[in-house]
Each structure stands twice: as structure tokens, then as C-alpha cells.
Image: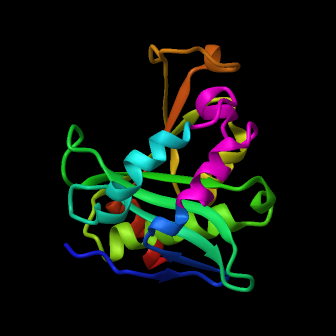
Amino acid sequence: MAMPNVLATERLLLRPFTEGDLENLVELDADPQVMAFLTGGKPTPREVYVENLPGMIAGRGRLDCWIWAAVEKASGGFVGWFSLRPDPARGPDEAELGYRLRRAAWGQGYATEGAALMVEKAFADFGLERVFALTMSVNLASRRVMEKVGLTYVRTFFDDWPEVIAGAEHGDVEYALTRADWDLRARR
């Protein structure tokens, strides 16, 4: 299924990544607070994005990660990114909702706005049957976003991570929404 080039919310444009986004991604992941629940605050090395950005630009197919750079409509400034990543291990009709935003964009409703659009597209346009999201149990802000866009708590689990970060002792959580539940809510 071909993915649309640009998606829009009230305040955001979600567009494909370009080579010009390298510095945006490096800067985003250089913020220790942005990376706190992912790497314990360690930045993603620049080389990782130099290597992976071409795939982020090209990966627009049914089994690739559907990822969009988010820019603020009013300023044109890079806010972060949103994604739906199909997980072949779970089946072709499921995808993981993902998002990462600059700290300056936190608390303004952008995460909820972009994540809600991803959920809508997943069911209305992309034909998925289930959307799920994962985060650390202690990442309360991300959990609130998941709940606001209709995902509900499924489970807490404990994985063996290569590096233990603060809060890992509380585990990770999975939230999810099925097409059937999304359809029920849409009819109300």
C-alpha cells in the first residue's frame, strides 16, 4: 500500500524525512530528557542516523516503518516524528505506534495530536486490525498520550535490556486498540 506523502493535523504537518533532517534527528536524540526512557539519557550517535536516514527516507512500503517528520505549521520548525511500524512477528495487520518530540514541544498537545492521526490512519486508511504502543511503566507522560488516543493497558512485562536504566525495575507496558474497539467508538 502506498503511503501518502504528507499528513496534516490542526497544527502539524507530517512529511517524509529528507536528507536535510539529519541535524534535526541528531539534535532531537542529543537531549538527555528526550532519551531518558529510551537510553537512560545517552544520545544516539550521529553515525546511526547517517547510516539509517536513507532507509527512513525510502522505507514507505507495507512491511517497512511508516515514519513521518513532524513540523509545526505555524513556524515550519521540526517538532519530532511519528510512526507506525508493522511488526512481522505479530502479523501483517498490527503496527506499533511511535513518537518522539523535542522537549520544547512537550506539554502542548502535539504528541496526542500526531498520535491520534496515526491511529486514525492505521484503521481508516491502512487497513490495520490492531495498533499497539510500548513504553516504560514509569513514563507517565507517554502513557497518558496512549490513553488519550484510545489505547488501553494490556500488560506489564520485563525484558532483558542490554543496559538497565532508571525505572526499568518497574517493567515496560503495552497499550493497544483493535479495529473492533475503534469501530465501536466511531459509531458512538
Residue at the spot x=58%, y=69% of the render? 70
Residue at left offset 65%, top offset 69%: 78
Quarter of the image with the N terminus is bottom left
Which color scheme did the rendering employ for the protein? rainbow
Percent from the top left, x then y, of residue 177? 42, 54
Q: What's the magenta region?
A: 22-44
Q: Position of residue 64 (x, y in %)?
A: 26, 55
- Left or right of residue 71: residue 64: left
Residue 33 image offset from top left, x and y in percent: 76, 39
* Displayed quadrant of residue 125: bottom left
Choose top left, top right, bottom left or bottom right for residue 131: bottom left
Query: Is 28 placed above or below 5 here?
Result: above
Q: Is residue 128 visible in this depiction of the protein?
A: yes
Side of 126 where 177 appears, left or right: right
Instruction: Please report the residue visible at 48 percent of the width from the left and 40 percent of the height from the top.
Output: 47
Residue 48 lies, with reference to residue 79, above or below; the image says above
Q: What residue is at 38 percent from the left and 80 percent from the top?
A: 5
Q: Position of residue 188 (x, y in %)?
A: 50, 77
